[in-house]
Amino acid sequence: MSLPEEVPVGSVVSLQFVVPPHATKLRVEAVVCYQVGFQHGLEFTSLNEGERMAIREFCSELPSVSKGS
């Protein structure tokens, strides 16, 4: 995830976003696992089952990215 500023590894952040096609905003917490410049790897820490399923459904519909073709 690209953030507007560098956030140190181990920091807990709050995120708010909408997962299409659901109109409900998700508000979750995550821990920063890695940071390279403004790019960050986040691990969600507070997902309930409905939020987990909404994210899983959305991600399953994303186009595949193949490496090194």
Image (tube, rainbow, N blue to C red):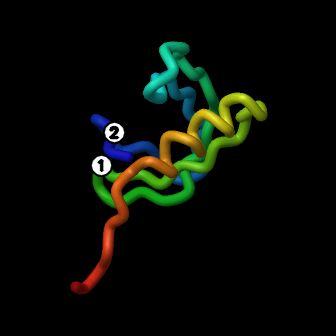
Q: Residues within 10 Å of mark 2 (few under 14, many from 20)?
A: few
The residue lying toward the viewer, choosing from 1 and 49, is 49
Calculate the distance from the C-alpha at mark 1 to the C-alpha at mark 2: 5 Å
Crowd tier of the residue under label 1, counting other residues whose Cα lies within 10 Å: few below 14, some 14–19, many 20 or above: few
Above or below, comparing residue 12 to residue 41 in the picture: above
Q: Give me the disc on residue 63.
A: none
Left or right of 68 on screen, residue 36: right
Callout 1 touching callout 2 (CB < 8 Å): yes
Residue 17: horizontal and vertical position, in percent?
46, 24
The residue positioned farthest toward the bottom in the image shown: 68
The residue tagged with tag 1: helix, strand or loop?
loop
The amino acid on which the numbered mark 1 sits, given as a three-letter code, is: Phe
Q: Which residue is drawn at the image coordinates 71% and 41% (left, top)?
A: 45
Instruction: Kindly identify which numbered label has been placed on residue 3.
Output: 2
Q: Residue at x 56, y 42 (%)?
A: 57
Secondary element under disc 2, as helix, strand or loop, is loop
Residue shown at 64%/43% (left/top)? 44
Q: Residue furthest left?
A: 69
Q: Which residue is mark 1?
A: 38
Q: Where does the image place residue 38, in percent across and percent down from the top left?
A: 30, 49
Q: Type of residue at label 2?
A: Leu
Residue 34, position as x, y percentages in the image: 49, 59
Residue 5 is drawn in which quadrant? top left
Answer with left or right where residue 10 lies relative to residue 40.
Answer: right
The numbered mark, 1 or 2, whose residue comes first in the sequence reads 2
Looking at the image, which residue is at 45% across and 25% down?
21
Quarter of the picture holding the C terminus: bottom left
Instruction: Name the one closer to the observer, 28 or 31.
Output: 28
Q: How many marks?
A: 2
Q: Position of residue 35 (x, y in %)?
A: 42, 57
